[in-house]
Structures are given as C-alpha cells and as structure tokens.
Image (cartoon, rainbow, N blue to C red):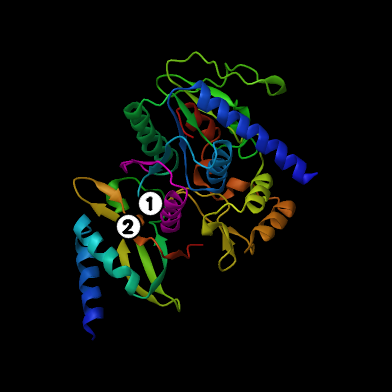
Amino acid sequence: MSNGKEKMENIIDRLNKEPSEENWEEFAKVLPKSGIKYYRVVYMKGSIKNAEDLTKSYAELFDEKGNLVTKVPIFKKGKKIEGALYYLKGLNNINK
Amino acid sequence: MIEQNLKELEERSIFILREAKSKFKNVAALWSMGKDSTTMLALARKAFLGKVPFPVIHIDNGIDFPETYKFRDDLTKKWNLDLIVAKSEIKPEISGFSCCGSNKTEALKKIMKEYKFDALIVSIRRDEHGIRAKERVFSARDKNFRWNYKNQAAELWDDYSSKIDTAGHVRVHPLLDWNEIDIWRYIKKERIPVNPLYFSRNGFRYRSLGCTHCTVPVKSNAKTIDDIIKELKNTDTEERAGREQDKEKEYVMQKLRAFGYM
C-alpha cells in the first residue's frame, strides 16, 4: 500500500471515529488529491426525530469510475452537532 | 414578444430594488444560491452600476449541497459580494416544517437583530406556491417576524407602497411577477452563472434547490438552459415537487411564511 493511500485511510478512520473540526480540516486537505469525484448523501429512512438519528446519516464517496471509495459522516461534532457537507466542496452529487 | 416581456420584468425589478435601497436605511438580501436569488443579484448589479450595494445573507445549516457551497464561494469572489453566513444550529426536531421553521427562521432572526436590517430582499415568485401568490412586493413583518397575510394593503396597477409602518421589518420581493421560464430565459440572455445541480445527470436534475435533507431531484434529461426551457414548456410537474416541506400537512407553507420563513 502506498504511503499516500495509507495516510488517506488513516485520516478517514479518524474522521469516522471522531468527526471533530480538526479531523474534517485534515480530510479537506487530502480530498482534492484523493481521486474522489462524486458523493451521495444517505439519510435514515423515515423522519428524523432526534440528534442521535442525524449522526447515523452518512455520505458515500465515489471515484470517477463510480466505485465506492469510502463513507464519511456529514456532521461535525464539537460542543454541538453541526452539518459538515461544505467540506465536500468540489464533488458532484449523485443522489437520485 | 418574449424579449419585450423580459425587458418589462427587468425594468420593474430594477425599479423595486432601487426603491428599496433608497427608502430603507439598512437593506440586505437573502441568497440561497438558487436560480432566483442569483438572478436577483444580477439585477441588482445592473441597477447599481455593477456592484451589489447591500449584504447578502446565506442561511447555512451545514447540509446544503457541496456544489452549492462551491458556487457560493466562487460567485462571492467573482462579483465581490458582501456575504454574511448565518449559521443555523441543527436541532433535535429537524424534519420538514421543524427544519425550515426552527433552523432557518431562527438563524435569520438572530442575524436581522444583530445587523439591525430594516428591509430584506427575498427572491420569491408568485407562481412557485399558492401562499407566495398572496404576497405583496413590499410586505410587512412584525417584531416577531409574523406575516399577517389577512391584512395587507393592495398593490393595484403596480402602485407599490414602501412606506410601511411596522415594528419589525419589510420584505421586498422584486421577482414576484416573474415565472420559472422567465427566470431561465433571463439567465440565458444575461449569461448568469447557475448552480450545476440544475442540469441533468444520469436522468435526474434538481429543479428547486433547498438543503440536502429536504430536496430530491426530478426526472429530466435537460443538460442545457435551452433543454430546461423546452422541458418547462411541456411539463405538468410543479416546480417544487422535490421539496419536502411542500408535501406536508395542508397549509404548511402558509404556516411557515406566517412564522417568518422565506
């Protein structure tokens, strides 16, 4: 495994474990060179009742051939939960 | 004929924007990065010699589309906009009515209070939704942001009154008389940049844009502005078919607007 890929995977692991601002910032830095081109937001089925349900939503990230590369959360957790989709700027949406 | 119609709409909107800027002390505009509010900013640039002379507010709950964020940042730089990002907190009760009501309206209230804006330009159109058809070009909100749609002055023969006595603020609607196809024809004519989500990808496109939570795409193969115009001439699907808050209980949009929603 190349160092770049290993680094990317470590960053995504950290982000999935703890979607803090620092981890999102780190992810945003490596995203442009990752080969990831598309994203799809996956929400829980039914209406979302509480903040805990929100944290179960995620974004699937795909490369230019449409292969699923990884999944990331869509929230930033600090003192409160905030949406974090702006960190995926530059990717194209394939929700439908 | 179409050219003439667009020219008349443009002139009316420019008049309303200039009237708003001259009659109110502290004006701001809402910008969702959608086609309507971006067209309004293009009109403002025309009305005020190439510069939007008021701040533009994006109510950001963090879960708008990534394309929307990129479009916002690119156009802010290109048009030198004075952008205010009003961060809205995601609250436990988040779906549909609660999402737009609590999250977006509360964030707007906070920013209006902080900056003391007395007029807010909002790019709604009468043909979008039944309740929006009840709006006036200059429309009062009380100090709690409530809209009393049962008690509004008539604006007959385009006789607008910007002298409104209210303890709150005034909403200004320069695009009220436009319809969806007018907007797309004007975007084409003026080469106004638009969010790429409006164009078809894999047989689907977004016709009306909100946050990722409440917006779904509609079936479409329209990949260019000409395709969109052609599609709109033949469609019988309503524009906001992909917006969840419009599908909830009866009169939910009326309730949202009465409570201060855009």
Q: Where is residue B10 in the image (x, y as percent from the top left)?
A: 66, 38
Q: Give the range drawn in magenta.
A: B65-94
Q: Quadrant of residue A28?
A: bottom left
Closer to us: B227 or B49: B49
Q: Can residue B52 be seen in this view?
A: yes
Point out the residue furthest to the front here. Answer: B49
Looking at the rendered structure, the kind of residue marked 2 is: Ile
Which residue is disc 2 drawn over?
A: A74
Question: What quarter of the picture does the N terminus of chain B occupy?
Answer: top right
Q: In this view, does B248 lie to the left or right of B76?
A: right
Looking at the rendered structure, the kind of residue marked 1 is: Ile
- Chain at tag 2: A
Q: Residues within 10 Å of mark 1 (few under 14, many from 20)?
A: many
Q: Position of residue B192 (x, y in %)?
A: 58, 51
Judging from the image, what secondary structure is the residue with disc 1 in? loop
**Any magenta on residue B95?**
no
Closer to us: B225 or B134: B225
Residue located at (36% from left, 45% from top)? B61
Residue located at (62% from left, 27% from top)? B134
**Picture layout, residue A67 above or below residue A51:** below
Q: Distance between the residues labelled 2 and 1?
A: 8 Å
Which residue is disc 1 drawn over?
A: B63
Residue located at (48% from left, 65% from top)? A94
Q: In this view, does B215 lie to the left or right of A54?
A: right
Q: Residues within 10 Å of mark 2 (few under 14, many from 20)?
A: many
The reply to whether dot 2 and dot 1 touch (C-beta < 8 Å) is yes
Q: Is residue B212 visible?
A: no
- Name the disc covering residue A29, or none: none
**Picture layout, residue B108 above or below residue B74:** above
Q: Where is residue A8 in the image (x, y as percent from the top left)?
A: 25, 74
